[in-house]
Amino acid sequence: MRYVDRRGVAAPPSLTANDGAGARELERAHGHYRDQRAGSFAFAAYKSADVAEAMRTLFGGKCAYCESFHSASSPTDVEHYRPKAGVEGDAAHRGYWWLAADWSNLLPSCALCNRRNGLRIAQSGMGRAAVAGQAPVTVGKGNLFPIRGRRATGPRENCEAEDPLLIDPTRRDPAAHLDWPEDKLSLVAPRFDGREHDVYGKASIDILGLNRQDLVEERTRYLALARAVLAGAESLLAVASGLADEARQDCLQRFDEQLTVLQKMCAADQPYSAMLGAHLNQRLHGLLEEYRALLAQRRAHDAPRQNRDEVAEVAEVAEDTEDAIDA
């Protein structure tokens, strides 16, 4: 999970226009919920095509919670951060129905983060075989929405007075609450707040099942691939430091290519980019410092005959890679 600035994408017209699907549906919902005995309402405005497209643009086609690409194999769930049809654990609450078509309450989610399922959960120190032997437990958001403070129960109440424990990555930076420790598998853990686990990190991991078997195995595979690319880049740089002239130039060019691959893997629109940045950040920064030192030597040695545009171009690769891992 990584922070995404919602201000970068305009709200879909179907939800914001005065005569749009969202406004018309909200008016009908107000009438429906005036009857205290009325059941759930059939919301549909949030399923509009422009909403799905805005979700894709905002999150790059990824699940807002687990950063998986999922649209190739299953449809995107437009998820209600504050659940629209009820709150689990509070039988009297009718859900945040007045936010059913509110752009700020919608997130793209994969089915496994959004829906309640029985899944195997990995624990620290486990290998693949141990995870496969776990008994499934029920995880997934569903209508779970734990908060601290007083819960809003109607459109006249202030939702901002609530303190939700589930992280909304467009409102709260997940990096302040989630950690990526070294382990046999790629697990996410809550950071520590003093001596206690961060409550937002722990709630988000537990509710969404962010250490579920298939997700952990895919993150582990992706991390191994990135580390292999990084190891290749480190080897190329080590070799380049002992070469001169054209041989060094050729080696650095191949190093540039490896950096470009890592830059793309760590980009915000790529899967598991928050995890990759956390694991690779320190090694990449050290490698880039070595790279800059070699470029400086190359400038000093080749200055009279070197194309300055070429030097600027390879230096720009380093800067772009650093921006990607720091994003």
Image (cartoon, helix red, strand yellow):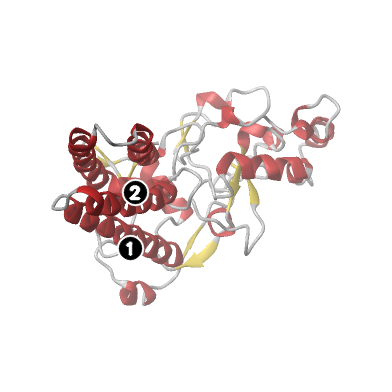
Q: Give the numbered dot on residue 224.
A: 1
Give how far across and how far down residue 309 sits, in percent. Answer: 38, 33
Give how far across and how far down residue 131 sits, in percent. Answer: 35, 71
| Residue at 41% in and 73% down | 135
| Residue at 44% in and 49% down | 264
* Mark 2 in CB contact with mark 1 (< 8 angstroms): no
Quarter of the figure that contains the N terminus? top left
Residue type of the residue flagged with mark 2: Asp
Observer-nearest of 60 and 197: 60
Q: CA distance from mark 2 to mark 1?
A: 20 Å
Q: Is residue 225 above or below residue 49?
A: below
**Residue closest to the far left:** 242
* Secondary structure beneath label 2: helix
| Residue at 42% in and 48% down | 273
Q: How many marks?
A: 2
Q: Is residue 56 above or below residue 20?
A: below
Give how far across and how far down residue 42 sits, in percent. Answer: 79, 47
Quarter of the figure that contains the C terminus? top left
Give how far across and how far down residue 228 sits, in percent. Answer: 30, 62
Q: Which residue is mark 2?
A: 256
Frontmost of labels 2 and 1 is 2
